[in-house]
Image (tube, coloured by chain):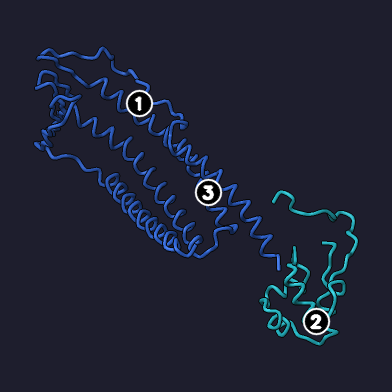
Amino acid sequence: MPIKLNLDRVMLERRISLTELADRIGITLANLSILKTNKARAIRFSTLEALCHELKCQPGELLEFVAAEQGETAGIEGGEV
Amino acid sequence: MTKINWLPKFLRWMFTIFAGFMIVATIAVCAVIVINPALPAGTQIGPFEVDMLGQPGSVVLRADHGASTFAVSALRGNMTMSVDQASGLIEVLKHYGLPLILLSTIYFAMLFDLLRRLFRNVGRGDSFTQQSLHLVQTIGVSLLVFSLVSAVAESWFSREMLTYLAQHTVVSISGTAIHFPVPQGTVISGGHGFPFGSPYFFSGLLVLALSEVFRQGLALKSENDLTV
């Protein structure tokens, strides 16, 4: 996926653990782990808002666009759903 | 949603009981095939009063040494139909009917077990999982295969039965016996062997169509699971 979430870098800068952040924003550790490892297919505005609020950052600091490598699809995947 | 939570549980238990009954029936049919019981000489079953095309009639089975008789009478005894060597008819039933019943009981035991597993998943809230999708697809395909196999087996059974009856049935009207002009060795075609009239065939198609709904539901759930 060409959109990368730099959650681990921001968390390191803020010196906050995964468990503590999960507690503060009210999502499960498993879901936060999915976000951190960039396995998520989508992120809700409410989750992004909570992350920005707790990490005191802008969405742009968390999200990064990485150009797709050759062979990867850049469009919306799973169009049949 | 919470109001109907009892339904998957109820269906799961119902299918468990049905699967249990089918397993018991399978064991019973196997036992009959292995023991191969015979009616003792002198046994008479009936006569039973039955309704024959709106007229009172009776059915009786008498077992003697090598000359059992199965007789059906109607129209106040004016018309009788008797099968000589009825023990042969019972043998046909044993050789061709029992395997047919065994096929059905084994299949239904398997089908009810698949349904029990499906509703166990549904009860847990795991409706849209790879396992549930696989179960629904298996049920659909098995119904199609069963409709085909049972149609062929039923046609085989009815062919054997009708051939035997045609060769050994004597119809008497007001005391005059009429023999069917069927020479020995004649084979009567019974049934067509096509599954398309079977309700199982259409149920199988319907379940396969539903499995596509499950497949799309699974795709949506996977998408939703990875939305944080």
Q: Are marks 3 and 1 on the same chain?
A: yes
At 76% from the left and 74% from the top, the residue drawn is A49
Chain containing the residue with disc 3: B
Mark on residue B159? Answer: 1
SS at mark 3 in the image: helix
The numbered mark 2 sits on a residue in which chain? Answer: A
In the displayed structure, B119 sits above or below B153; it is below
Q: In the rendered structure, which amino acid carries the disc numbered 1? A: Arg
**B51 over B166 or under it: above or below:** below
Q: Amino acid at mark 2?
A: Leu
Callouts 2 and 3 in the same chain? no
Q: Colour of chain A?
A: cyan
Observer able to see residue B84: no
Distance, label 2 to label 1, CA atoms, is 80 Å
Residue occupying image coordinates x 28% and y 24%:
B164
Question: Residue A42 or B133: which is nearer the viewer?
Answer: A42
Question: What shade has chain B been given?
Answer: blue
Foreground pick, B55 / B172: B55
Q: Which mark is residue B138?
A: 3
Q: Amino acid at mark 3?
A: Thr
